Image (spheres, rainbow, N blue to C red):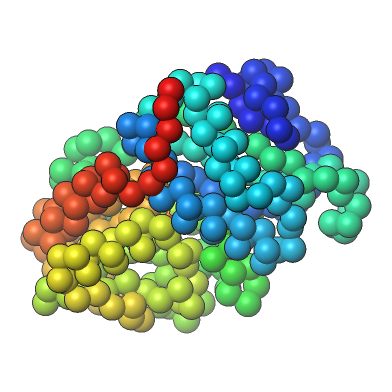
């Protein structure tokens, strides 16, 4: 496997960064998780825009232009001869010393890893998944805004561990007031009386690119979609529920905190959106050759 590291394509064994990198010492950096489907990088422009927004927000300089990041991603995919891939772009503050001050870092570290994607088992897409609310609340917007896709994922990891301890694979995270925020690596939607609802970003969630794609699909299918405050109760009484994310794509949810949703099987609207999303992965992105 080949990895892009600071402008060079190197062998996996040579792809190492210093223990003084502030990405390692403090989680000081940003990343993106992207997919390619049959030589098409899905929504690449949107992912690169979000990467630059995350970096801008934490005053991190990306030492490449957007075009150069695009080219570097494609070069890495080609070096690994991958048609279908998971792409991880990481920009860290770089090598510094044992102190928080980012001005001591001598230059950002840029890494691009491409690999095969490990999906949830197919049975879950057919039968749906159960999720559970966890005690760890999503980061406050005023503390570390969840819209920043930072290298500091401890908030989500704690929630994931709590879900696993409870015997579930994914956690429902609430904000500090008890409103629904998102899951550890996915946004959440519900269907009620034929309308689609998802929490607004100000409730403390990442502006998911899959989420935006689903809102676009809803417009196309003439399903009315709303960004709306949701409580757990709204989830419990929903007709359908599903998660969206680059890794999970569209995952039907059939149980929330022990309450069965919509008869315990993926619903009609969810299945329609899953079908449209599959079509979109064949169209919406940037093509490359291997
Ligand atoms: N919320 C959070 C906290 C995320 O990390 C999403 C929502 C969905 O956003 P997108 O843009 O992907 O629709 C994410 C995305 C991984 C992995 O390796 C995680 C994500 C994406 C890709 C891979 O766990 N999270």
Q: Residue at x 91, y 52 (%)?
A: 104
Q: What count of labels does the image hold?
A: 0
User: Is 110 placed left or right of 104 in the picture?
Assistant: left
Q: Residue at x 65, y 72 (%)?
A: 143
Above/below status of 85 relative to 275: above
Question: Looking at the rendering, in which quadrant would you find the C terminus?
Answer: top left
Residue 53 is at least partly visible in this image: yes
Residue 264's x, y, as percent? Answer: 12, 56
Residue 240's x, y, as percent? Answer: 17, 64
Residue 160 is at least partly visible in this image: no
Residue 61's x, y, as percent? Answer: 74, 55
Above/below status of 226 relative to 161: below
Q: Nearer the viewer, residue 24 or 168?
A: 24
User: Is 175 placed left or right of 111 in the picture?
Assistant: left
Question: Looking at the rendering, in which quadrant would you find the N terminus?
Answer: top right
Above/below status of 257 relative to 164: below
Residue 138's x, y, as percent? Answer: 51, 67
Q: Residue at x 65, y 24 (%)?
A: 9
Q: Nearer the viewer, residue 45 or 10?
A: 45
Q: Residue at x 73, y 35 (%)?
A: 6
Q: Nearer the viewer, residue 22 or 177?
A: 22
Picture quadrant of residue 85: top left
Q: Nearer the viewer, residue 132 or 51?
A: 51
């Amino acid at each position: 496997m080949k990895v892009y590291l600071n402008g060079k394509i190197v062998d996996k064994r040579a792809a190492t960064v210093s223990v003084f990198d502030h990405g390692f010492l403090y989680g000081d950096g940003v990343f993106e998780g992207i997919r390619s489907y049959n030589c098409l990088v899905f929504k690449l422009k949107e992912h690169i825009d979000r990467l630059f927004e995350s970096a801008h927000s934490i005053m991190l300089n990306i030492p490449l232009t957007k075009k150069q990041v695009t080219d570097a991603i494609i070069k890495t995919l080609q070096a690994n001869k991958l048609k279908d891939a998971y792409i991880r772009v990481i920009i860290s503050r770089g090598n510094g010393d044992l102190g928080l001050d980012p001005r001591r870092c001598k230059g950002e570290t840029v890494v691009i890893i491409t690999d095969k994607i490990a999906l949830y088992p197919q049975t879950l897409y057919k039968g749906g998944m159960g999720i559970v609310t966890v005690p760890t609340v999503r980061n406050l917007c005023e503390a570390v805004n969840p819209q920043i896709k930072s290298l500091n994922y401890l908030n989500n990891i704690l929630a994931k561990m709590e879900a696993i301890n409870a015997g579930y694979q994914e956690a429902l995270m609430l904000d500090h007031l008890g409103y629904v925020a998102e899951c550890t690596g996915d946004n959440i939607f519900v269907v009620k009386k034929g309308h689609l609802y998802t929490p607004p970003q100000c409730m403390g969630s990442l502006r998911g690119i899959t989420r935006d794609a689903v809102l676009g699909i809803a417009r196309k299918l003439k399903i009315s979609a709303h960004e709306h405050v949701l409580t757990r109760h709204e989830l419990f009484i929903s007709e359908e529920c599903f998660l969206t994310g680059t890794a999970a794509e569209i995952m039907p949810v059939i149980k929330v905190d022990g309450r069965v949703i919509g008869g315990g099987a993926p619903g009609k609207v969810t299945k329609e959106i899953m079908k449209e999303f599959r079509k979109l992965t064949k169209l919406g992105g940037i093509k490359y050759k291997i």
